[in-house]
Image: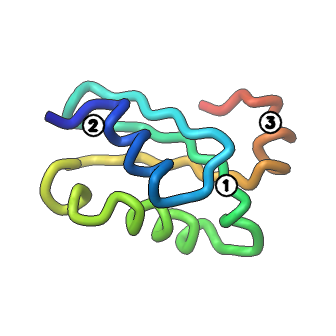
Amino acid sequence: MVTNESIERSIAAGLSCTHVVVDGDGHHFQAVVVSDQFAGLSRIKQHQLVYAALGERMREEIHALSLQTFTPEAFAATGGRVG
């Protein structure tokens, strides 16, 4: 079964994250991911890194994932409030 926590673990295992939070209902998920690895990358490239960390789970288990990706500096600029 896909859980918020299992998605968080998969993302954190595949990326060097300073913050990752996933919320969802078992079918549709929203994630906030903060990583130094996003520095200098377009939003599309950032999202591709997250999808790569999730691997086959994106094709087989996770049907909908909305992403918000940030560098640590950009996340700090939001005051940690995203929505």
State which tag comes first along the sequence, 3 or 2: 2
Q: Amino acid at mark 3?
A: Thr
- Rendering coords of residue 6 (x, y %): 32, 37
**Which quadrant of the rendered structure holds the N terminus?**
top left
Q: CA distance from mark 1 to mark 3?
A: 15 Å
Residue at screen point 30% across, 65% down: 55
Q: Which residue is mark 2?
A: 28
State which tag comes first along the sequence, 1 or 3: 1
Q: Residues within 10 Å of mark 1 (few under 14, many from 20)?
A: many
Q: Residues within 10 Å of mark 2 (few under 14, many from 20)?
A: few
Residue 8 position (above or below residue 43) = above
**Which quadrant of the rendered structure holds the C terminus?**
top right
Mark 1 vs mark 2: in front? 1
Q: Amino acid at mark 1?
A: Ser
State which tag comes first along the sequence, 1 or 2: 2
- Rendering coords of residue 2 (x, y %): 21, 36
Q: Which residue is mark 1?
A: 35
* Quadrant in the picture for residue 76: top right
Q: Which residue is mark 3?
A: 78
Q: Amino acid at mark 2?
A: His
Residue at screen point 61% across, 56% down: 16
Residue 46 position (above or below residue 82) = below
- In the image, 78 versus 36, the foreground residue is 36
Numbered disc 2: secondary structure:
strand
- Rendering coords of residue 20 (x, y %): 56, 39
- Rendering coords of residue 57 (x, y %): 23, 56
Q: CA distance from mark 1 to mark 2?
A: 23 Å
* Quadrant in the picture for residue 56: bottom left
- Whether residue 56 sits left or right of residue 16 in the image: it is left
Q: CA distance from mark 3 to mark 2?
A: 24 Å
